[in-house]
Image (cartoon, rainbow, N blue to C red):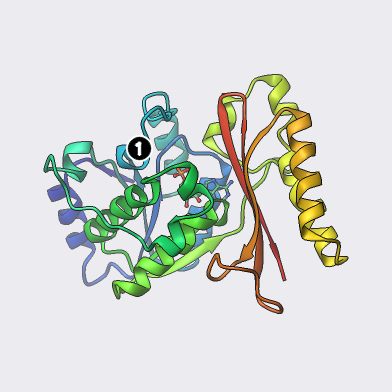
Amino acid sequence: MRTVEQLDSLRATLDGWQGRRGRVGLVPTMGNLHAGHLRLIRVLRDHCDRTVVSIFVNPTQFGPGEDFQSYPRTLDADLEALERESCDLVWLPDVETMYPLAESFRIQPPDRLTQKLCGLDRPGHFNGVASVVLRLFNQVSPDVAIFGEKDFQQLLIIRQMVKDLALPIEIQALPTVRESDGLAMSSRNQYLTAAERAIAPLLHQTLIELAEKLSAEHSWEDSRQLAWDQLEEAGFQPQYLEWLSAESLGPPQPGRPQRLLVAARLGKARLIDNVGLV
Ligand code: AMP
């Protein structure tokens, strides 16, 4: 496994693969790798010959007062895990490499995809995400990249960016990897106290129950209100709870894929989750 920190070493390594490099796959991450990240790597391996994992805690996707400074950074453990996964290359750019100019180019995804869900609670977040992912795509030139459905809005924005900008990159998606009690794995789960961790799985349970009610044709407004109240009673501060088209994030369309999506604060953590409906 090669670990590179400079753009010229990255290019040299990728060039060295040329001719016999086969398909290159990229897994963008912010590090602090958990079993969800490792599953991304394993699944991607079925779609490529060489696996590149990037680790970069991207400042432009954090808002003022968010957890950029305290975001868990565990590079040694991450590199050990990637070695075990037989990752070929780890790309570790620093901030100057990613944003060499004080005023840098930013990509602005369409409002249709950002002015809802996490985009409302985290203004500018998806500009930062799109801007860093486009840079990673340009640096690594992958044939395929993989993203988790856990960040469902992010996945749709990346898919739209690739389509809109005609990037020759295949995007794969991985269903959310969960703890045994249903909690979606996340680096931010470690912000939870033991008491909060015990109630955190209620977020996923709430979505499952809502999905069941919708398939039994209960009223959405009533079911949503009940679910919202239950979350608040348990100690969450819900931020959104939405039922949307899984294709456009617009209103759900009968007979087309749909998604229930939730975000809630629990103590210091902001947790998100989503489930699919047919
Ligand atoms: P992050 O390091 O949190 O920015 O995540 C890097 C990638 O891992 C993103 O594509 C996430 O959607 C994905 N990811 C994070 N947690 C999970 C999970 N529990 N299941 C599936 N994918 C995940």
x and y percentages locating residue 14 in the rendered image: 22, 59
Above or below residue 174? Residue 238 is above
Q: Quadrant of the C terminus?
A: bottom right
User: Is the CB atom of the residue marked by disc 1 within 8 angstroms of ligand 1's nearest atom?
Assistant: no
Residue located 16% across and 47% down the image: 104
Q: Which residue is mark 1?
A: 57
Residue appearing at x 13%, y 39% in the figure: 102
Give percent across and percent down for residue 277. 72, 66
Q: Is residue 135 above or below residue 199?
A: below
Residue at 55%, 71% (x, y): give it: 247
| 139 relative position to 275: left or right | left
94 vs 81, left or right, is left
> Viewed as shown, does residue 263 lie left or right of 163?
right
> Quadrant of residue 24 in the image?
bottom left
In this view, the residue in front, 29 or 128, is 128
User: Which of 46 and 262 lies nearest the eye of the viewer?
Assistant: 262
| Left or right: 12 in relation to 143 | left
- Classify mark 1: residues with Cα within 10 Å, few (<14), some (14-19) or many (20+): many
Q: Amino acid at mark 1?
A: Val
Residue 181 shows in this picture:
no
Instruction: Tell which residue pokes out farthest to the bottom in this image.
Output: 255
Residue 194 is situated, as x and y percent measured from the top left of the image, at 69, 20
Instruction: From the top left corner, tell me how far across and down residue 196 is, in percent.
Output: 69, 25
Q: Can see residue 262?
A: yes
Residue 203 falls in image quadrant: top right
Q: Residue at x 69, y 27 (%)?
A: 197
